[in-house]
Image (cartoon, grey):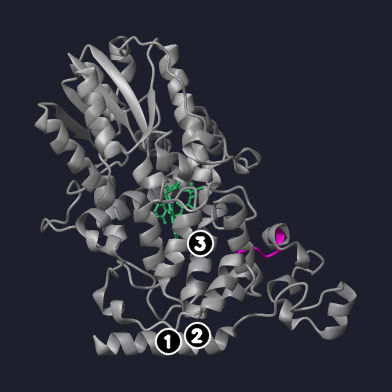
């Protein structure tokens, strides 16, 4: 029996549901990854850190399979047609892959499945990238959860070895098809160029994921205390590895679950947020078509000033913490979670710009972009989502800055224009008296922007905007 494993966002050769099942049920297992032209051809920028991250991680997976005497075929084609053609050419009986929950991927998988079926080839797909999926955790009434805490409690109650045990791929590794090594297409041949990924502290591939996780385990006990401060090495930085499956969610969740304690429990909580948004997307796919989770907010009439939006994107709003956050995103493709909340809230509730604009900007820039978490995060900040921040609660960008970057360490890194300001001045440089500005050699509006809006004025405006929308509903 022959089969083909189609790798997608699961770029590893251990604890892998599809690979395990394929190896268990067939004697000769081929492996393929497709750089999908249906996705890549739409990317506007040839310098895309995600493509480079995937390229590096696919290369590492290919080397690992070659070390087992097999290979990973790497294609640059439209996956929807290339997979059925390859399956036919290899004369396999089945194609194995892992579930994807994004509507466009689901549509693609349906096309592939029916083309395979037309040739008598089966397609088997498995849960792999989440702990619980789809309908696995429902309320007592059999309904999907829309509030996180009861969802989390239900998950923790249900969690056991069955859901967390690894798939022992190594048991059947001998069933990998023996094949000659094929060439890896270069990044340039895919239409992309190198970015600054190598300069970032972001190791790629399975080894990179393992290295980051081992490093994080040394400080996981302090996760809760440290996770909110962008200048502190607090979180795990594993999001991109979770996005592309170079780590196993079961391995991460099991480690945190077994470890216990405040830090590990807090981190497990975040992994459950990830599952939560995946199940929201499954049950409410309309959120993938730009709809608010709470329909009464679909009518919000944001003024959408394009100039303000540009200032936000470029990190020149005059609010130092917001600017530092946006510059971190632009320069590294990653943004600290606290700052994602602050920057998103600022766009919607201070600049009065539609959250969908920000959602799209993050989608273009984030190396860890995942539709469900990004949409969930944006709708949370805009108060349009399930279990979101209430609409009348508005982050104050100055107090957030004073609280979470008290010494301005993070701001100084990304907004060097303000480096000479003292720890008090750095959060709101427009309040610095003229003589002191002179002493600092800082010209507001020239060296660093004056604030593009006044927080108190905007706060009043956004409150009436939301009020109008809720009373109209
Ligand atoms: P850690 O703190 O180490 O958390 C571990 C893992 O838990 C993360 O890697 C992630 O997979 C998951 N996680 C943590 N927080 C959340 C959350 N609030 N929602 C869902 N999953 C979470 N996360 C993404 O992975 N992709 C996105 O596109 C994304 N967009 C976001 C947009 C906004 C507006 C907001 C507020 C949050 C967004 N998040 C997103 C969630 C969170 O900011 C990142 O997961 C986190 O900052 C990644 O860093 P880390 O791996 O060091 O996180």
Look at the picture and state if 56 lies above or below 49.
above
Q: Is residue 369 left or right of residue 167?
A: right
For marks 2 and 3 on the same chain, the one whose residue lies earlier in the sequence:
3
The reply, left or right, for residue 420 in relation to residue 450 is: right
- For mark 1, give the secondary structure: helix
Vertical comparison of 227 with 100: above or below: below
Residue 212, compared with residue 408, is above or below; it is above
Q: Mark 1 sits on what residue? A: 463
Which class describes the residues within 10 Å of circle 3: few (<14), some (14-19), or many (20+)?
many
User: Is the CB atom of the residue marked by disc 3 within 8 angstroms of ligand 1's nearest atom?
Assistant: yes
Image vertical order of residue 310 relative to residue 139, above or below = below
User: Looking at this view, is 75 or 397 the one in front?
Assistant: 75
- Where residue 227 appears, as percent x and y from the top left, is 54, 53
Q: Where's residue 329, x and y in %?
A: 57, 56
Asked if one can make out residue 192 in the rendered structure from this viewpoint, the answer is yes
Of mark 1 and mark 3, the one earlier in the sequence is 3
Residue at screen point 19% across, 42% down: 111
Q: Where does the magenta region start and end?
A: 404-409
Residue 449 % position (x, y)? 70, 76
- Secondary element at tag 2: helix
Q: Name the residue that disc number 3 marks.
A: 340
Depth order, front residue of 469/109: 109
Characterize the local packing of mark 2: few (<14), some (14-19) or many (20 or more) Cα atoms within 10 angstroms.
Answer: many
Separation (CA) of disc 1 from disc 3: 21 Å
Residue 459's disc number:
2
């Amino acid at each position: 029996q022959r089969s083909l494993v189609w790798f997608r966002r699961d770029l590893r050769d251990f604890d892998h549901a599809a690979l395990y099942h394929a190896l268990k049920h067939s004697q000769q297992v081929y492996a393929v990854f497709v750089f999908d032209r249906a996705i890549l051809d739409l990317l506007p920028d040839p310098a895309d850190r995600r493509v480079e991250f995937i390229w590096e991680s696919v290369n590492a997976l290919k080397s690992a399979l070659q070390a087992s005497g097999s290979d990973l075929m790497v294609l640059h084609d439209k996956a929807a047609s290339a997979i059925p053609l390859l399956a036919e050419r290899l004369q396999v009986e089945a194609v194995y892959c892992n579930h994807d929950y994004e509507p466009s991927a689901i549509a693609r998988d349906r096309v592939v499945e029916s083309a395979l079926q037309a040739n008598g080839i089966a397609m088997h797909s498995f849960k792999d990238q989440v702990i619980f999926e789809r309908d696995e955790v429902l309320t007592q009434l059999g309904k999907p959860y829309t509030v996180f805490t009861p969802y989390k409690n239900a998950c923790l109650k249900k969690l056991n070895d069955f859901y967390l045990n690894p798939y022992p791929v190594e048991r059947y590794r001998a069933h990998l098809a023996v094949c000659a090594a094929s060439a890896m297409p270069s990044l340039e041949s895919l239409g992309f160029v190198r970015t600054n990924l190598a300069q970032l502290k972001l190791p790629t591939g399975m080894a990179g994921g393992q290295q980051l996780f081992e490093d994080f385990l040394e400080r996981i006990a302090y996760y809760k205390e440290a996770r909110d401060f962008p200048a502190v090495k607090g979180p795990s930085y594993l999001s991109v590895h979770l996005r592309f499956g170079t780590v196993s969610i079961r391995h991460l969740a099991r480690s945190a679950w077994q470890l216990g304690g405040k830090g590990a429990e807090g981190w497990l909580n975040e992994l459950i947020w990830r599952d939560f948004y995946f199940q929201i997307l499954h049950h409410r796919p309309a959120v993938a078509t730009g709809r608010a989770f709470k329909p009464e907010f679909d009518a919000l009439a944001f003024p959408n000033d394009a100039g303000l939006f540009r200032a936000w994107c470029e990190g020149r709003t005059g609010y130092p913490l917001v600017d530092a956050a946006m510059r971190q995103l632009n320069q590294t493709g990653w943004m600290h979670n606290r700052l994602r909340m602050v920057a998103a809230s600022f766009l919607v509730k201070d600049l009065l710009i539609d959250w969908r604009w920000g959602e799209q900007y993050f989608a273009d820039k984030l190396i860890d972009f995942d539709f469900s978490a990004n949409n969930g995060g944006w709708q949370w900040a805009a108060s349009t989502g399930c279990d979101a921040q209430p609409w009348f609660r508005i982050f104050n960008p100055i107090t957030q800055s004073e609280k979470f970057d008290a010494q301005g360490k993070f701001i100084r890194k990304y907004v060097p224009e303000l480096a000479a300001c003292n720890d008090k001045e750095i959060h709101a440089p427009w309040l610095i008296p003229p003589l002191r500005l002179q002493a600092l050699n800082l010209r507001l509006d020239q060296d660093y922007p004056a604030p593009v809006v006044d927080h108190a004025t905007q706060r009043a405006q956004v409150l009436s905007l939301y009020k109008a929308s809720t009373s109209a509903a």
